[in-house]
Image (tube, rainbow, N blue to C red):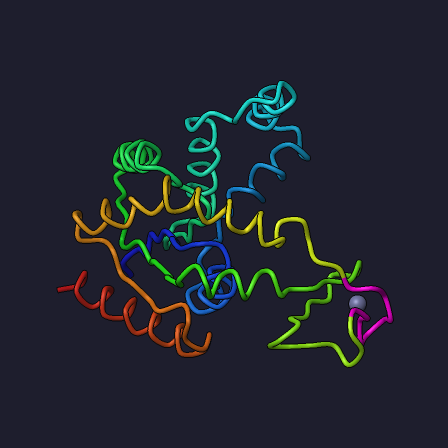
């Protein structure tokens, strides 16, 4: 079977996490979320985790090559059939570095899946999210609780996460447009970009991605 080495792109709130969950089930690919990966290495106090911690304790960013090492470890451990990478690369420089390292392993990306949504949609989706301390999620417009600001399941108060405050969302979007969105052109020039409309219903988006991946696999076999 051919490998599916995939990268997920798209602004926050476009539904990447939801689609990643579905793809994980469909294809049995390990999901590599770089935030989780970093946390896990730190918790397990691996060499890479300790190194990362020393940067973070100083308030510095974890260097790209360290993150890439973590990714490659996971790919070698669990990614025989492919992988699903989320949250990295975020810049063109990181994309170059990643492709160089994958090359050394004799692997290459199958596709960069870009799930797109306009800023207004992202803002509406994220700033309307409410959560209780048990993690139950609501949306003031799309999935409201029975009583305003109270969790249906446990009666706990619902709050908006700091990350979802409109000003924070706008900042996250600005960073995305500036640093990460150029990756769409980058992967498009390499024939790897596949675009999906993140404003559609999540089942529809999922069907579209699955069909695209099935086609890619057929093409690889020819
Ligand atoms: Zn709750």
**How many numbered marks have been drawn onto this rendered protein structure?**
0
- Mostly what secondary structure, the magenta segment? loop
Residue 203, by quadrant, is bottom left
- Residue pushed farthest bottom? 146
Relative image position of residue 46 (x, y in whole percent): 61, 28
The residue at 33%/58% (across/down) is 113
Q: Nearer the viewer, residue 111 or 181?
A: 181
- Quadrant containing ligand 1 reads bottom right
Q: Nearer the viewer, residue 45 or 141?
A: 141
Residue 184, image x, y percentages:
28, 50
Q: Residue at x 58, y 21 (%)?
A: 55
In this rendering, the answer to whether 96 lies above or below 82 is above
| x 20%, y 68%: residue | 218
In the picture shown, does residue 40 fall above or below 163?
above
From the top left corner, tell me how far across and down residue 103 is, in percent: 25, 36
Q: Does residue 13 lie above or below 189 as drawn?
A: below
User: Bounds of the magenta span?
Assistant: 149-158
Closer to the camera in the image, 109 or 202: 202
């Amino acid at each position: 079977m051919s490998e599916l080495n995939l990268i997920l792109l798209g602004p926050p709130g476009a539904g990447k996490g939801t689609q990643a969950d579905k793809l994980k089930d469909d294809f049995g690919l390990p999901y590599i979320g770089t935030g989780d990966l970093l946390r896990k290495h730190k918790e397990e106090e691996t060499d890479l985790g300790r190194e990362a911690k020393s940067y973070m304790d100083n308030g510095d960013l974890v260097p790209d090559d360290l993150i890439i090492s973590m990714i490659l470890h996971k790919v070698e451990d669990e990614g025989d059939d492919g992988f699903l990478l989320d949250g990295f690369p975020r810049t063109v420089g990181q994309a170059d570095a990643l492709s160089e390292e994958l090359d050394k392993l004799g692997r290459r990306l199958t596709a960069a899946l870009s799930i797109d949504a306009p800023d207004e949609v992202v803002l509406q989706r994220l700033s309307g999210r409410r959560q209780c301390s048990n993690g139950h999620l609501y949306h003031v417009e799309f999935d409201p609780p029975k009583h305003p600001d109270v969790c249906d399941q446990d009666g706990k108060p619902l709050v908006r996460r700091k990350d979802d405050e409109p000003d924070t969302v706008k900042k996250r979007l600005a960073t995305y447009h500036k640093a990460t969105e150029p990756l769409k052109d980058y992967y498009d020039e390499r024939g790897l970009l596949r675009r999906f409309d993140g404003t559609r219903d999540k089942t529809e988006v999922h069907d579209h991605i699955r069909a695209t991946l099935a086609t890619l696999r057929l093409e690889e076999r020819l």
